[in-house]
């Protein structure tokens, strides 16, 4: 893997659209190449080709590859996003729609994954190394 590329776990929250009855699995399945928005926090480095695993309520349910790096939204884009979604977003990125992969159920629980990979999960973002990533895929029964 290119040294610039990273592997992250994004912990989705009910504070976002998921508190409004949006199912996170269907959201990711249908994400395609629509922007993924960040409010205040964004990953420090997330170049194209990086891998993002997604979790919600302590379960890691899928992954995708970053197509376009994180960018800061213009004032116009911020206003449009606020009008459309009701949230104040500052950054966005694009996922590669063909890379979206929903794991088979049952989804691995972060509390079971953490001791096996020797890492605690952050509240929003967690960076993984290649070995940790592959252990998660094994637990998700993805090969």
Image (cartoon, rainbow, N blue to C red):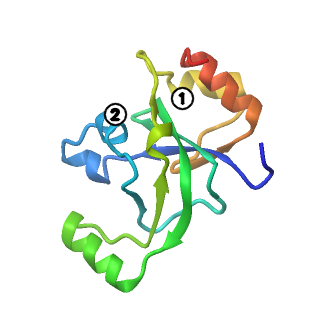
**In the rendering, at what x and y percent does residue 35 appear?**
39, 59
Can residue 56 be seen by looking at this rendering? yes
- Residue 79 lies left or right of residue 128; in this view the side is left
Query: Residue, x 26% and y 75% (percent of image)?
Result: 80
Residue most extreme to the right: 3
Would residue 31 appear left or right of 86 to someone viewing this image? right
The image quadrant where one finds the C terminus is top right
- Which is nearer the eye, 73 or 116? 73
Which quadrant holds residue 128? top right
The residue to which callout 2 is attached is: 25
Pinpoint residue 24: horizontal percent, then vertical percent.
32, 38
Relative height, residue 109 to residue 25 (above, below) = above
Disc number at residue 110?
1
Circle nearer the N terminus (1, 2): 2
Assess whether mark 2 and mark 1 are in contact (beta carbons under 8 angstroms): no
Q: From the image, which quarter does the N terminus lie in?
A: top right
Q: Secondary structure at mark 1?
A: helix
Q: Residue at x 69, y 49 (%)?
A: 6
- Up/down of 129 relative to 117, above or below: below
């Amino acid at each position: 893997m290119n040294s610039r590329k990273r592997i992250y776990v994004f912990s989705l929250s009910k504070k976002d659209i998921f508190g409004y009855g949006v199912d996170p699995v269907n959201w990711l399945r249908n994400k395609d190449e629509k922007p993924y928005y960040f409010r205040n926090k964004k990953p420090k480095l997330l170049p194209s080709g990086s891998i993002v695993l997604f979790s919600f309520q302590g379960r890691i349910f899928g992954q995708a590859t970053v197509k376009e790096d994180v960018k800061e939204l213009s004032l116009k884009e911020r206003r449009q996003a606020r009008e459309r979604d009701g949230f104040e977003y500052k950054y966005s990125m694009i996922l590669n729609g063909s890379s979206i992969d929903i794991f088979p159920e049952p989804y691995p629980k972060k509390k079971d994954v953490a001791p096996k990979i020797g890492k605690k999960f952050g509240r929003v973002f967690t960076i993984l190394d290649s070995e940790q990533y592959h252990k998660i895929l094994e637990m998700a029964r993805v090969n």
